Each structure stands twice: as structure tokens, then as C-alpha cells.
Amino acid sequence: MNALVQKSTASLDALKRIHPLMPWFASFVLLLPLPLLALNDYQIYLLNVICIMIILATGLNIVKGFCGQVTVGHVALYAIGAYTSGVLSVKFGVPFWFCLPAAIAVTMLAGALVGIPSFRLEGAYLALATLGFAQSVEIYIRVTNYLGSASGLGGIAPPSIGNFVFYDYFRYYYLVMPFMLIAVYASFAILRSATGRAFMAVREDALSAAATGVNVRRYKLIAFMLSAVYAGLAGSLFAHMVPGYVHPNNFTVIEMVTLLLMVVLGGIGNIWGGIIGAILVTIIADLTRDFYFYQLLMFGLVIVGTVLFMPKGIGGIIDRYFVSKRFVAAREKTAEQKRAEAAAAKSGES
Amino acid sequence: MLYDFLIVGLSIGILYGLVALGISLIYSGLDIVHFAHGEIFMFGAFFGLVLYDEAGFNYPITLFVAMILAGIMGVIIERVFYRRLTSQGGGYTVAGMGMIICGFGMAIILQNIAFLIWGANGRPMHVNFGMPVELGTITLPQSYVWILVVSVALMAVLHLFLKHTKLGLAIRAVAANKDIAYLMGVNVPLMISLIFGVACALAAAGGVLIAPINYVQVEMGYLMLIKAFAAAVVGGFGSLPGAILGGLMVGVFETLGAAYISGSHKDIYAFLLLIFVLMVRPTGLLGVAAKVKA
Amino acid sequence: MKRHILGLTAAALASSVALNSLSAAEIRVGATMRMISENGQKYGEMVQDEFDAINAAGGINGHTIKLSLLNDECKSDKGVANANKFIHQEKVHLLIGSTCSSVSLPIVDVTAQAEVPQIIPHSTNHQITQKGSAWVFRVPISARYYKGVVAKYVGDKVGKKIAYLYASDAAAVSDAEGLQSQMKELYGVDPVYSAQVQEKEIDFRSHLLKIKALSPDAIFIAALQEPMARALVQSYEVGLPASVKRLANSVASNAPVPAMAGDAIKGVFYTAAYSDSDDRPIAKLFNSMVKQRYGISKVDHDFSQAYDLVRIVEIALRNADLKLDDDNLKADRTAIRDAIAGVKDYQGLASGPISFCADPTPECRDGNRTVVLIGYKKGGEDFELGILDRVTMPVEFGLEK
């Protein structure tokens, strides 16, 4: 196990040395044949869902994990992305490749709207404001005939390039997966950039961040808008996936809790954790499909249990593993040095 | 016509206010938002239903016993699950965020437990209060009178208790700063349990009082909870008289909105008011200045 | 811990592999329904029990039926996931689903693409059969027939000024908007008031006050059980006189509604596919069976539709020439589709005969056309119903030309 991890980190480092983007390209190549390994179309469908969930969870991590803003309205942004894309496609016949940027742009503006209350509000107040926003969006969709109201918005065309139509799950995977990889890469890039450091400064202590010259409001707004970009992307990809149907029931508080579960289980603020959380939750939700009476109960228990007993989530464990690894390595190194020095001293004595 | 709408708005608003009382109490005492409060409210209603319909208690005793049961339930939940978070403080801390997520999880747990026990069908609670109250052309079931009396009484008692007794002072000390309260010799864990228990009892009172007019159903908590949040915030988060006042305001606001703007968007108005108040005056109508804790 | 996670993932993969090993010679049927609320779980149980009974009696031409039942919580994404799981992983021959129209609608596209027969137990939204899918069949009555019966009855007997209050669920929307368009077409009248409410709404009085001021002839309420009961009770609270007729959609037939609404439900009438007070021998037998098996005192039409669905599936499977091996999956699915399309004049619990045919049109796929108009004589736990009318609608009724 340890050897495996060591080997893989070593090869990752080797790839990084060739070019910083090499590991990403390698993972792209590794992910390419995944649907061929799937046993049936249903598993490919799950792969698509997992990719969308990863995008969504990664986006939520930016605002919640990096920047420390307590939002429970993320699912509303997802809905806005999905509906923008859907309406453009169904009502105006706009092709996917224009729907997608439009959805992202609209969702980004909506994200800015959600972000504005965060200037004045923190913690509980912000959670309530975003909850109110999420509820309003859901209700608005439900009662608006133009958006299909409770009958849902159907007939959203699948994306296509020329004559190549992404109408089945196998093809759709090759659309979703690259988007997912780009999104994850971008979130790492954000985390490492000056913006990411500013986010973390805001998260740790907004007051001292402001004192050191970080424009707190600006970075809060940017965090909300960036996470909205992810939500818009995920929403658009969800809307255009077969059977191209969106319904307000897909964007309720239950979905919000599922999303929270992914991020919390993975570890708030940990990108890999969020990804693992999204994968695990989707797979577990699928495996427990037969136990539907107890499924939500279990979700609830996992959320409560994670928050109470594993507040850093799975990501925290992974981090600790690598930290301790580094620590052990460093300790062994110093011990060896000491031994060498001692040996040298001994040989000097004699 | 306006008069009728006002009556409707005030009568529904007092329901929101009653549920908001408990939410405000928890916030004022522990600086956390409890997202599972709607489910305690639902459990309270079910306790009431079982006690009244199946065990045959009379209504006031049902109300009282259901409150005590829910209070005990609240204390147990707090002791077993939330203690790790509540003892660290809430609000803007990491524990505060944990508490929000944990509350969501607990809400789901409680709702599904209730579903496994009582099933999903709505059940009526037949309480014969006698003649309904007639106000102009509108008749209000007597439940509303009970709700008004009980909620104002509970609000007044709690307010006096918090402001004018030694125990109340201790609770306020915990609310202000747990560490210093400790140093002053306050039994902080006990106070936290007490606050939680009383708040859950308040939720149960809401459930039992609303049950005769609103039926008892496992999903009854959520909509009530978010309306009550709106009420608590509008009135001033943490202020008990503010919770009742906020409830009335939300009720009237959404009823008038539905009456004069657009009926289909009725449920959005409460949230718009919530967001508006949060942006313009986060302290609410009667709120104390928003506390900033490290 | 990491090892645990890896173990978990491995277990996940292993079990999905295990699920994939299929035994032959079984007829695999997947059902996705809304099973967390209302009587939903009992409808699911009924489907399961009926298939078990068929198996116990020797199965279909010597083959047993394997039913997998999943819950979609009335969420389209979960319903689509369930459908995909059934179709691609469990390789079902037939898919049953769903309860909610908003879930059935997208699944129609999934089954059409995967070429799997789908039979619908409860959804009434008119668009379901209008998508041109050759693979979908509907046992319940389409909203387009309901609206015709209600509009005619209301226009003739009650009046033409109608106010509408309907919840934001797909069936209620379809019922209310259908009735509005039908009133417009038949009599050229617009609704005097129309508003949507939330699925879990608790206070209808602001709407009802406005409606009262408009003094309509009737008010149409379409919502889930609890909100419907609430709306009926509150309509008397705001002083809407009993002379304003209360109409409801078929949800009013669910037993908790009269129990909750009490006296307020007296005089309410609604349309459904089946009535508890039906006096045919088969209906009486069915009522006592449901009462004994599921403890339901009054049987609503969702039970009868679940039962009729199983019978129709049974007939179709008996008539279909099935190979039931992996190579013939596609052929078997087609055979089952054609066999269902061949079901003609099925006489069951539904108030009239159910017939399907081969064309992928609503005329062929909305099999049930007989609507009963039912009125409440008495509310409470021991409510009483009376059949006001029984109408069989023409096949092409309510379609846009």
C-alpha cells in the first residue's frame, strides 16, 4: 500500500518535471478508456453523473472550503445553470455550444447576486439568506409556466459537433469528462494563485485579511462567482444529458443536502476530498437504491457522524497521511544524518 | 377586504412566530442556527397526536406532556450529538458551519425516523374546541386563540425568565461568552442543555397547537421552519418578542403580497422579505446588534 | 482508513458485478414508483404481491417473473437513474413507471431510445403519450379525457365561472390547465381566478378570499392530499358559501383526504378511473381484498390502476412468444411491446374497457377512456361516495389537430 502510494507520487513528480500540465494530460489519457471497462450503459450513466457531481462539489468547495462562506444556496445556482441552458435550447433552438457559455454567464451573475449579502452577513445569517434565495428560485421555477412549471422542461437537445451527436451516455462521457478535468485543474490553479491565498486569508480571519490589504468584499464576490461558474457548467451539462429534462424537484433541499454530504464527507476545503466525496456518495447512493426506506436516514447519519467525528473528512485523513509520510521521511533523513555524523565522529576519534 | 387579508395574515403569522420563538432562543443562547428545529416541531405534533388521540389525554395536558417529551428529546439530541459543536461556540466559527450542516443531517434523520414510525400519510387531530371565532366574514377555528394566548404567554414568561432571574442571567452569560461564563462559575454544559430543551419544548408546543388546523405529517416541518427563520430574522434574530412580531410581519407581508401582487408567488414574498431585511438591517426590527465572536 | 475506502470501492465494484450476473428463463420486470409518501408504498406492495401470486400459481408459461421495485421519490433524475439501472444493468424486459407525471415524462424518452416497453401505472399528464414513442402504454386515464368530462359536467350543471387553485405538481398542473383550455374551447370562458400554490402549502386563505370576492360558480382544487384537505377546510373558514361547488382532481379519492377534511369535503366532486362504491362483483371482491391485505378501508383508484396494470402485463406476457435468453433480449422486448399493444377490451377494475393498439399515437396508447364522476356524500373517516356519472370519451378527444 505504502509502496504503491510512494510509487505513484514519485511518477506524478516525474510527470510534473516534464511539464506542469503533464499529470493532467496523463489522467485524461487514463480516464479515456473508462467507459470501455464499464459493464453496461448504466455504469457509464453513473460515470457521467459522477463527473457532473464532481464539478458541482468542486465549485461548492471554492466558496465554502477556500473562502469559508456558509452557503446553502448552491443548488439554486445549479438550477439556474440548467434552466438557462434548457430554455435557450428548447425555446430558441440555440445549440449547446452557445447554451453552455450563456448558462455559465447567467449563473455567474446570479452567483454575484448571492455573494452581495456576504459583504455584511456571516455564518448563520448568510446561511439563512442563501437558503431564502434557494427557496425563492425553486418556487419561482415551479410556478412559472414559461419554465415548464411543475411539468418540467423537456426536449433539451443533446450537444453535437457537426453530425456527431452526444445522444447516449457513452458519447456524453467524452464531453463531460474533459470538462470535469478542466474544472478540477482550474480549482487547483485557483487555490495556488494569489486569489486562492486571498480566499484562505478571508476564511481564516476576515478582519486580519483586510488589515493586510486583502479586499475582503472583492474576494468574497469572486469566490461566489467562481463557484457559480462551476454550478452553471454542471447545470448545463446536466440539462443536456439524455433525456434532456429538468424539473424543479431536481433542485430541492434534498439535493442540497446530498451536495453538502459530498463536500463534508470529502473534507471541506480539500479538492481531492470533494472529488472522493462526490464519487463515494454517488456510488453509495446507487448501491443503496434498493434500501430506499433507509437511504436518506443513512445519509443523515453519515453527515452528522462526519461533522462530529471526522470534521476534516476523508481529505483530512489523506492529508494527514501525506503529512505524516513527509514527517517520517524527514525524521528518517535527520536520523540517518546523525548516524552518519556519529559514524564520522567515531572514525575521527579512532 | 383589506381587513380580511389582515386577519388571515396575522393568524398565519402567529403560527410562524410561535415556531420562531424556539429558533430565536437557541440563537440567542448558543449563537447557532438549528436546521432540525422543524423536525422537532413535527415530532411534537406527533407526540400530541399520540397522546391525544391514542392515549386519550385532554388537550392542555397533551400540550404540556408533549412539550416535556420534546424537551427531553432535545436535551438527548444535544447531549449525544451536538455537544462537540455547541461547547465550541457557534456563529462565525468553524463549529458554527458544522452546526448548520449537522442540523441538516439531523433533520433528515429525524424525518426518516418519524416516517418509519408513523408512515407518510397526513393525519387529522380532532380536537373539539367548540364554536369557532367569527371576525367579520371570516371564521377562525379556536386553535388560533389558543396559539395566540400560548405563544404570547410563553414569550412573556421566557422573556422575564431570561431578563429577571439568576438562571436567566446565567444563560445570557453563556450566550455572551462561554469561557468567561465558565470562569464565573456558571455550569455551562447544563445551561446549554437547558436552552436546547426549552427551545425544543417550544417547538413541540407549536406542533401540538398547529396540529388541529394543519394535520400531522412527517414533512410538515420544513416549510414551517423556513418561514419561521424568516420570522425570526425579520423580528431580530435572538429577540423573543421580535420572533412573534416577525412572525406576524411575515404572515401579513406574504398574505398582502398574494392578495395584491401575484397569488402564485406567495411563498417567495417571505424569503424576499428575509433577504431584504438581512441586507438592509441584519439586526431585524427588535434585534440586538449582531454579535461578532471570535 | 484509506484501506477502508479502497475496500468499500472494491466492494462496490464487486457487488455491481454480482448484480450483473443474470439468470435466464426469468421475465425481468423493473418498477420505479413514488414510494415514500401517500399510499405510494402500498401501491408498490400491491404490484409486488400480484406478481408473486402469478409466480405462485405457476408463472407465465412456466417462467417466473422477477420484479425489482425502486423508489424515485417523485424526482425525475432518480427516476431516470432507476430506469437506466433496470434497462442496462438488470436488462429488464418490461419497465413499470412511474407514479408521478414529472418522472414518467423523461423516462418515456429513455425507454424509447433503449427500446424497452414501458407501462405507466399512475401518471395522467397528457404529454406522456404524445411524444411519439412506440414503447409507452398508459393504464390510467389521460388528463385530456378527464378535462373533457369535467368541463362538460360543470358547464351543463354548475356554471361557467370557475376559479382554479392548483399545486405545482405535474398532474395537478395538467388537470387544471387542461380544464381551463377545455372551458375556453367549449364555452369560450376564461378562468375567473387561477393561481398555483406550493406542494406543501399550508395557508390558502389569501387565494380563497380573492376567489370569494369574485363569486364564481365553482372552484377547482388540484393538489396533494394534505393541501387539498386544508384548502377545502379553509374555503369554509373564509366564508366561501356551500353554493360555490368544489371540484377536485382525482387525488380527492385518496382516503386520507376525507378523513382530514371532515365535513368540508361534503359535496366535493372529482373524476377518477375507479370508485370505491362501484357495485360490480369484481369491484366488491377487490375492495375486500385490499382492505384485508393492506388495511385500507376505502380503496382509491391508484390501487385499482396498479392491479389492472399487473393483469394487463400478465395477459400480454402470456400472449408474447418469449425466448428469455441473452441473445434475444431485444426480440423479447419487442414481443412484449407488441403483446401489450395487442391487449383489447380488457375488462378489469377500470370503469370501462382498456384497449391498446400498435401506432405510437396517443389514440393507441391512452388505453383507458372511461371516467367516473364521483361526489362525496359524507366526509370523515367513514366517508360515503356516490357515482354521479360514467362517461367513455371518444378516442381522439382533446388532441390538437
Image (cartoon, rainbow, N blue to C red):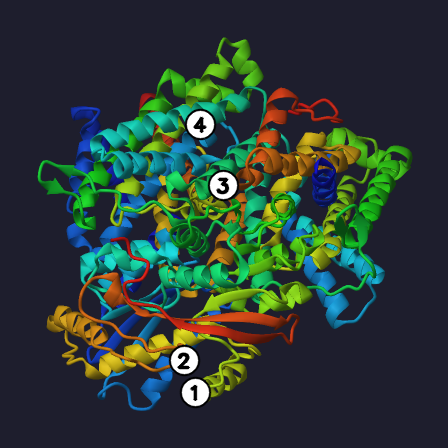
Question: SS class of the residue under badge 2?
Answer: loop
Left or right of A38, for residue C295: right
Q: Which residue is mark 2?
A: C349
Q: Which mark is residue A66?
A: 4
Q: Chain of mark 2?
A: C
- Which label sits in the foreground, 3 or 1? 1
Do badges 2 and 3 share one subunit? no
Q: Chain of mark 4?
A: A
Q: Which residue is mark 1?
A: C282
Q: Position of residue B3 (x, y in %)?
A: 74, 37
Q: CA distance from mark 4 to mark 3?
A: 30 Å
Q: Which residue is mark 3?
A: A139
**Residue B225 visible in rendering:** yes
Residue found 90% across the figure and 36% down from its top: B166
Q: Chain of mark 1?
A: C
Do badges 2 and 4 share one subunit? no
Q: CA distance from mark 4 to mark 1?
A: 65 Å
**Residue B117 visible in rendering:** no
Crowd rating for badge 4 (residues with CA inside 10 Å; few <14, some 14–19, many 20+): many
Crowd rating for badge 2 (residues with CA inside 10 Å; few <14, some 14–19, many 20+): many
Q: Chain of mark 3?
A: A
